[in-house]
Amino acid sequence: MNLKRLGYRAGVPDQLSPGRQRRSPVARGGRPTLNADLIAAAMLELAGRDGFRAVTMQVLAEHLGVTVRALYRHVRDRQDVVDRAVELWLATWPEPELDASDWRASFAEYCRLRRETNRAHPRALLFSLDEHVGDVRLHPRRLTAPDAFLGFLTELGLSMSDALFVHRDLTLRLYAFALLVDYHHDVGQPVVDDSPMPRAWLDHFPDLDVPHLREAMEVPRIGPDEMFDRMVDDVAYTITRLRKL
């Protein structure tokens, strides 16, 4: 993760707000030293795994092996850390390289990059529900990336209204996949797959007349990668259909 990206506010480097100007050395004696960027990276790591609400200043301090007082030498308060962590996360947004002449391949690659970004910090996707985010320094890529995707879709022949529909539909699918499939798979929990319900629910009512559910439970399950590829193909089919309207 490139912490230098934190030096941007709407694309202008090093316009830091008051209270953010003092920086600790990047390293001392060959070891990273405590500074605001390191604290923000730790917040993002923990929030991406456990959610922002779970990460108190005490939790951060224990994770970094320092005291809470030491944290406050580098940041104003927890809100400052949250804002910095969100800035850091937004700076990782993938820049699409979309080619209309080979649109299916470049679309699939764009979806793969979005999946990779979401998978790195899945529960950070919920920051708008968990936190009030202040005046963050927005990386320009967070604007140029969706602009390029909308331009790609309109170049394929979609109206802007249809392009917005595809953009929203894809975003919802990617977020849901990150939280319901990849997150559970990566932490070793049961994955929400295409089965209608947990088998234990049916086992609880062995005499209940639900033949379609029982048949569905016997259909072989697929893995997360195949699930993702099928989801991408489904959105690609939507694009193909809208191009013909």
Image (cartoon, helix red, strand yellow):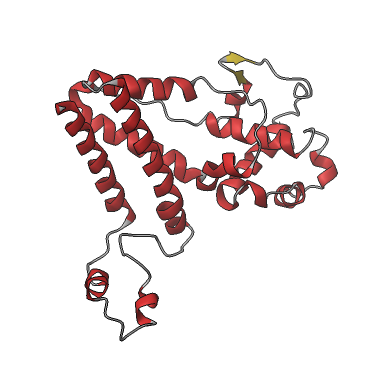
Point out the residue furthest to the top here. Answer: 12
Q: Residue at x 30, y 86 (%)?
A: 207
Viewer-closest of 186 and 165: 165
Q: Is residue 232 above or below residue 216?
A: above
Residue 234: x %, y % from top left: 24, 43
Residue 84: x %, y % from top left: 66, 32
Viewer-closest of 218 and 161: 161
In the figure, residue 199 lies in which quadrant? bottom left
Residue 40: x %, y % from top left: 66, 37
Q: Is residue 33 visible?
A: no
Viewer-closest of 210 and 235: 210
Residue 226: x %, y % from top left: 27, 52
Point out the residue furthest to the bottom here. Answer: 207
Q: Residue at x 36, y 20 (%)?
A: 148
Q: Is residue 130 above or below residue 3?
A: below
Q: Residue at x 38, y 70 (%)?
A: 198
Q: Is residue 233 visible?
A: yes
Quadrant housing the C terminus? top left
Q: Residue at x 35, y 31 (%)?
A: 167
Q: Is residue 220 left or right of residue 244?
A: right
Quadrant housing the N terminus? top right
Q: Is residue 37 left or right of residue 159?
A: right
Q: Is residue 99 left or right of residue 1?
A: left
In the figure, residue 10 lies in which quadrant? top right
Point out the residue furthest to the right here. Answer: 69
Point out the residue furthest to the front here. Answer: 209
